[in-house]
Image (tube, rainbow, N blue to C red):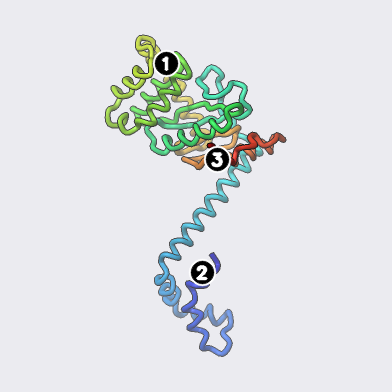
Amino acid sequence: MVSRTVLAMLPLLLLVACAPSPSRDGVKEAIKEHPEIVLDALGERKAELFALVVEGQQDYQTGQRQARQDAELQKPLSPAIDPARAMRGPADAATTVVVYSDFLCPYCAKGATTLKEFASRHPDSVRVLFKHYATDELAKQVALVYEALAAQNPQLAFAFHDAVFAAQTEVEQGGEPVVYALAIKLGANVNQLKRDLKRPELAKRIEDDTAEARAFGFDATPTFVVNGVSVRGAAPLSEFEDVLRRVARSGGQEAPCAACDKKKP
């Protein structure tokens, strides 16, 4: 970054090089009197300047994320975990990932794929609790169908979860008929589904999930909480693995997976 900054300022340095021994104050004075010199120099290197801005933004975001996760390691977030809710993974898993998601959010679809891969790398130690952060009416209805299916069979609910994210465009375009068709295709008991969709406690569960996410200060989807430490947005697999290691170390545990960094065959 420094070398590119020097490169951008090279014309200015050449300008003052004619002076016998240009002092720091002399250079500053020249810039004050002729600020257009700097602007011209930077204008000739817009691509490099843009790259610097992007790099600076990435560094800032990395620092902010690191600081937030450090704070959460010291004081973990505590989402409500009801063992009666649908879970993907072993009930006695050492690590619980709570995800706040929206079935109609494209980033949530991407995040769901990454989370599924993450869980598959830790089949004996990670479980997933899917919660809702749905504000759109159709998204709320899809969430309600998910919870109604979970009352029938947790595996059916997660099969529906995968199917909806895979058919997200069709769901958005076709609405509720497409949602119900997916549930029926997966083997849902239609009569029970109709009854469960009317259960007020399921609708309240969705509202409570959204309220909990907001109480934690989450303002976008997807957001994941890995044993109390948040991973925000459609983060790469490497961030999940990094958080998992840090959580394990903070608890005095060994690394959760000796093969975490190895590519799957």
Residue identifier under label 2: 5
Q: Nearer the viewer, mark 2 or mark 1?
A: 2
Residue 46 image label: none
Q: Amino acid at mark 1?
A: Pro
State if disc 1 and disc 3 touch (CB < 8 Å): no
- Across and down, in percent, residue 76 comes to 62, 35
Q: Residue furthest top?
A: 191
Residue identifier under label 1: 200
Task: Please tell me whether residue 171 is drawn above or below residue 193 in the rendered image.
Answer: below
Q: Earlier in the sequence, mark 3 or mark 2?
A: 2
Task: Please tell me whether residue 220 is drawn above or below residue 56 in the rendered image.
Answer: above
Q: Is residue 203 left or right of residue 244?
A: left
At a point 44% along the width and 25% down the height, the residue shown is 207
Q: Nearer the viewer, mark 3 or mark 2?
A: 3
Q: Residue furthest front?
A: 265
- Across and down, in percent, residue 151 comes to 46, 15
Neighbours of disc 1 within 10 Å: few (<14), some (14-19), many (20+): few
Q: Is residue 39 left or right of residue 28?
A: left
Within the image, what quadrant is residue 122 found in?
top right
Q: Earlier in the sequence, mark 3 or mark 1?
A: 1
State if disc 2 and disc 3 touch (CB < 8 Å): no
Residue 95 versus residue 205: which sits nearer the camera?
95
Q: Secondary structure at mark 1?
A: helix
Neighbours of disc 2 within 10 Å: few (<14), some (14-19), many (20+): few
Neighbours of disc 3 within 10 Å: few (<14), some (14-19), many (20+): few
Q: CA distance from mark 3 to mark 2?
A: 38 Å
Q: Amino acid at mark 3?
A: Lys
Q: Residue furthest bottom?
A: 20
